Image: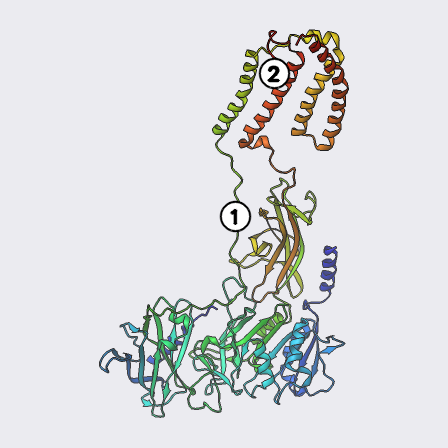
């Protein structure tokens, strides 16, 4: 049945060029709708990927991101308001509700206006810290654009981001440098694994308050690579929230601006368009999306090799197993990229792992890719069930930065040996003494019966005693 | 989180210093002092720092030491106050760094103080010396300055260990766990078993031998069989058959197969036994036994 469903989805996907895996209704919240023309190339890129855009102002009374308790839109783009906040329809509480209902949000900030406290408190909910004095600007005297910001140094030229860690795939690789004009830097909380920086400032950058610290910076909010210019938050339900520190970097003029680096010989074109595409693709669940196909576990009755066809495999996903038996487990994983499902390959140093656990894992094994179909990779492994009986779970818990979370659990009972599955007494060498004793007794008894029935009395005169 | 230091700006900057086309930031009259709490003014390290020449001597920062740098920032030849005057301390292995701000007056005279308390824990716990660089830059077109100035070795007080702190949760591959099975129950060495089994089995011939010495015999078989052949045959046969049923129950049968068979054989034993045993009684009353 699952095959049929995924085939249907595949057929539907084929109809559009690119489609987010979670819907195409996109709402852009702009305070001054006249400004939307400055970003027309960005809207065209989004429309080309299959989104239907709606533009609203936060002052609009009728604006509501919910309708009858469900989300009215699948994705939100929020531009920084010049006034106090985002209005009554977009309070931090409602935006968090939106995230809880699996909606994705792209929020941009700008250093031109002070950030409203509603946005500061919303980001604080996600453990993203903004400078407490709301007027801030990130500058870098070593990596700025000499063409447009030769004096003020507030247009940063940042190289394309590299992979976050060796075991995480880079979804934001672009060719060239990215111009980040007049950005608000963010600091990411350290405690949560849900936050990841997409674009970090260079090590000589810092954030300061242009009003108070015009002469010399005394107490910068954050410095260097601790400043995150584009940050990503992925909640447990895989809802994505991206904060882009500079609204201007999405404007048409910065999509193909000519910039010159400090000490550089010639001018280069920015890679802002490609980067904006990559960031919006990730935020709106076009990339970094994992899908689970068929999950199968079965008893390995003597067959040591596993094949993916159903023929020749014993009853799959039984509800009960016995301890200390050989069991095989396979799971099918696909990665969805913009238009289609493709086989998922985890990065080189990373593995998908299976946990066989009751209250805590008895086994945690790395799954190896056994086979590939057109759309998916089949990962599997075989192992011996522990010698503890009880209720166990086969659990694949694969959560990684920038990937939707995979948490598949199947519960099975593991029973102990049945009364006739124990080794027989003649197989236990220590028992031979007693087994021998029993049969010696049997032989003695039969001999005694024969003697008693058929013997002639001993010489006369001997008293008949027992 | 991994960081990547970009060395390109500092390389370009040091290159730019050679070209005298634009003015560049720098510093002069820079002194570095390390003083312990309670020690006199004369004690401790005191070095001069110069632009673009890292100190070859290692600077040690102990638990009660204060590292102080005094300098005058210059733009070209003039003493001037920059917007950014930082002392950046970097841990080479992970790339983590923290910057300490100079408090610079209008005249360009700047000062920064650093103690172990100011260093964040990952830098305090570093095993390699930390790299300290001076960053002096500002708005405008003057070339900014960033260059390694010296290296700091953090000398921690062995009596005051610093808790490394809980590592924050990060999603990633976890360690493999393989269940360790309980070992199967083991039997003692077979030779001991065989010795005792032989002892047990040996009791049977001993028993037969003792019976023989006491005058055991089967002399009345012909007499018994001639007077009640069927009964005796059935009776002794059913005794032997019952043992056979026990053997089958031990090896392959279950109780539901055993009980009917035992019942049938028991019935045969009962019916034939009454006749057989009354024949034995006859022989006893005749005085033959």
Residue A420 figure quarter:
top right
Q: Secondary structure at mark 1?
A: loop
- Residue B153, percent across and down? 32, 71
The C terminus of chain B - image quarter: top right
What's the CA distance linking mark 2 and mark 1? 63 Å
Q: Chain of mark 1?
A: B
Query: At 41% across and 68% down in the image, what residue appears?
Result: B163
**Extreme bottom residue here?**
B106
Q: Secondary structure at mark 2?
A: loop
Q: Quadrant of residue A108?
A: bottom right
User: Residue B160, can we see it?
Assistant: yes
Rendered position, A311 above or below A197: above
**Relative vertical location of residue A15 with respect to residue A92 in this rendering, above or below:** above
Residue A253 visible in image? no
Q: Nearer the viewer, residue A317 or B186?
A: B186
**Category of crowding for the residue at label 2, using alpha-carbon neighbours closer than 10 angstroms: few (below 14), some (14–19), many (at least 20):** few
Mark 2 vs mark 1, foreground winner is: 2
Q: Mark 2 highlights which residue?
A: A465
Tally the marks. Answer: 2
CB contact under 8 Å: marks 2 and 1: no
From the viewer's perspective, tell me whether residue A146 is left or right of residue B69: right
Q: Residue at x 62, y 41 (%)?
A: A303
Up-down: is A90 above or below B174? below
Q: Which residue is mark 1?
A: B180
Residue A322: % across, % down: 64, 45
């Amino acid at each position: 049945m699952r095959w049929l469903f995924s085939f249907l989805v595949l057929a539907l996907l084929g109809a559009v060029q690119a489609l987010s895996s979670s819907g195409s209704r996109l709402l852009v919240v702009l305070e001054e709708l006249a400004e939307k023309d400055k970003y027309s190339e960005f809207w065209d890129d989004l429309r080309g990927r299959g989104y239907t855009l709606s533009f609203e102002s936060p002052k609009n009374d009728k604006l509501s991101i919910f309708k009858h308790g469900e989300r009215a839109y699948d994705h939100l783009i929020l531009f920084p308001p010049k006034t106090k906040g985002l209005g009554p329809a977009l309070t931090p509480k409602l935006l968090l509700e939106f995230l809880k209902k699996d909606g994705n949000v792209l929020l941009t900030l700008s250093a031109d206006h002070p950030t409203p406290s509603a946005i500061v408190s919303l980001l604080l909910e996600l453990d993203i810290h903004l400078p407490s004095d709301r007027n801030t600007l990130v500058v870098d005297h070593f990596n700025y654009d000499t063409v447009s910001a030769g004096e003020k140094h507030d247009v940063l030229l940042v190289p394309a981001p590299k992979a976050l860690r060796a075991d995480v795939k880079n979804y934001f690789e672009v060719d060239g440098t990215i111009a980040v004009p007049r950005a608000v830097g963010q600091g990411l909380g350290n405690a949560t694994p849900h936050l990841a920086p997409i674009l970090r400032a260079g090590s000589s950058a810092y954030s300061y308050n242009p009003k108070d610290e015009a002469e010399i910076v005394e107490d910068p909010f954050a410095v260097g690579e601790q400043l995150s210019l584009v940050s990503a938050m992925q909640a447990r339900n895989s809802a994505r929230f991206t904060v882009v520190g500079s609204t201007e970097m999405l404007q048409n003029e910065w999509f193909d601006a000519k910039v010159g680096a400090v000490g550089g010989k010639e001018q280069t074109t920015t890679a802002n368009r490609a980067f904006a595409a990559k960031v919006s693709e990730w935020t709106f669940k076009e990339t970094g999306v994992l899908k689970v196909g068929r999950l199968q576990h079965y008893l390995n009755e003597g067959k040591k090799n596993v094949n993916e066809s159903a023929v020749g495999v014993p009853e799959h996903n039984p509800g009960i197993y016995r301890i200390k038996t050989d069991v095989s487990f396979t799971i099918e994983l696909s990665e969805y990229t913009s238009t289609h499902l493709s086989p998922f390959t985890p990065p080189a140093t990373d593995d998908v792992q299976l946990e066989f656990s009751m209250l805590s894992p008895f086994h945690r094994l790395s799954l190896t890719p056994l086979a590939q179909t057109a759309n998916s990779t089949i990962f599997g492994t075989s192992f011996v069930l522990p010698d503890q009986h009880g209720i166990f779970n086969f659990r694949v818990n694969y959560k990684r930065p920038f990937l939707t979370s995979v948490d598949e659990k199947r519960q099975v009972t593991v029973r102990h040996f049945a009364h006739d599955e124990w080794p027989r007494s003649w197989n236990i060498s220590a028992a031979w003494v007693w087994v021998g004793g029993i049969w010696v007794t049997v032989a003695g008894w039969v001999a005694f019966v024969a003697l008693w029935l058929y013997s002639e009395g001993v010489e006369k005169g001997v008293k008949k005693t027992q | 989180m991994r960081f990547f230091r970009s060395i390109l700006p500092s390389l370009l900057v040091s290159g730019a210093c050679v070209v005298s086309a634009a003015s560049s930031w720098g510093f002069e009259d820079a002194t570095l002092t390390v003083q312990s709490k309670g020690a006199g003014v004369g004690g401790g390290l005191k070095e001069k720092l110069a632009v673009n020449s890292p100190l070859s001597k290692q600077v040690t920062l102990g638990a009660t030491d204060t590292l102080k740098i005094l300098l005058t920032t210059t733009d070209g030849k003039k003493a001037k106050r920059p917007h950014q005057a930082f002392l950046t301390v970097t841990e080479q292995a992970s790339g983590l760094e923290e910057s300490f701000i100079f408090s610079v007056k209008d005249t360009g005279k700047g000062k920064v103080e650093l103690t172990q308390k100011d260093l964040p824990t990952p830098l305090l716990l570093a095993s390699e010396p930390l790299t300290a660089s001076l960053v002096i830059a500002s708005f405008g077109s003057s070339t900014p300055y960033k260059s390694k100035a010296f290296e700091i070795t953090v000398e921690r007080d062995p009596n005051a260990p610093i808790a490394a702190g809980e590592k924050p949760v990060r999603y990633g591959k976890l360690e493999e766990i393989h269940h360790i099975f309980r070992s199967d129950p083991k039997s003692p060495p077979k030779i001991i078993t065989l010795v005792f089994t032989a002892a047990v089995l040996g009791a049977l011939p001993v028993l037969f031998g003792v019976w023989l010495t006491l005058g055991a015999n089967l002399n009345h078989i012909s007499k018994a069989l001639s007077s009640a052949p069927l009964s005796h045959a059935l009776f002794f046969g059913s005794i032997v058959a019952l043992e056979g049923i026990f053997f089958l129950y031990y090896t392959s049968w279950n109780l539901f197969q055993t009980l009917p068979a035992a019942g049938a054989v028991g019935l045969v034993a009962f019916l034939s036994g009454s006749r057989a045993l009354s024949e034995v009684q006859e022989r006893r009353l005749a005085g033959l036994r």
